[in-house]
Image: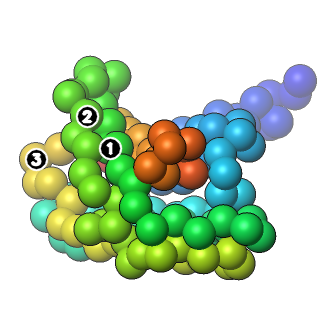
Amino acid sequence: MGFVTAVILFLGIYNQTNSVTDCSKGTSVFKFMSGSLLPDPVVPGQDSSITLNLEIPPGTNVNAGTAKYSFSFNGIPFSPTTEDLCSDVACPLLPGPYTNTTTSVFPSGVSGKVTTKIEWFDIANNRLLCADVTARL
């Protein structure tokens, strides 16, 4: 590998700030199409928005379930929280394209890597979604 190629790869990795990826490796009921965390990079103390674009398969109708949120800061995990899925998203979730956007204030005084794992489950505990959201400040 040439020096210029190595520098370009390093800068590409180093400059990556936000990412949203499918952490189910394609095994969730909902198909993860894409996701974003904006602005990129996030600005502590200001609004940031997570958008998830999903495809809900035919025959799927979700009227209830749970949402689990796990957080880590610079590799240090915090206790996950579990909430009622339909208090976080409008149920029922029906077949077809589905987009969910959530906006909240990104915490001030944070620097480093913040990772959030979002998991949605139906009432039979089938995993509907697994998304990893990473911000680097």
| Res 135 seen here | no
Relative side of 16 to 5, left or right: left
Q: Nearer the viewer, residue 85 or 77?
A: 85
Q: Amino acid at mark 3?
A: Gly
| Res 87 seen here | yes
**Where does label 2 land, which residue?**
80
Tell which circle, 2 or 1, labels the residue nearer the N-terminal end.
Answer: 1
Specify few, some or many for label 1: CA neighbours under 10 Å numbering under 14, 14-19, or 20 or more. Answer: some
Q: Amino acid at mark 1?
A: Tyr
Q: Nearer the viewer, residue 14 or 86?
A: 86
Q: Are marks 3 and 1 in contact (CB under 8 Å)?
A: no
Going 11% across and 54% down the picture, which residue do you hit? 108
**Where does label 1 land, which residue?**
69
**Where does label 3 land, which residue?**
109
Q: CA distance from mark 2 to mark 1?
A: 5 Å
Residue mark closest to the camera, 3 vs 1: 1
Q: Are marks 2 and 1 in contact (CB under 8 Å)?
A: yes
Relative side of 34 to 79, left or right: right
Q: Residue 112's x, y, as percent?
A: 30, 36
Tell which circle, 3 or 1, labels the residue nearer the N-terminal end.
Answer: 1
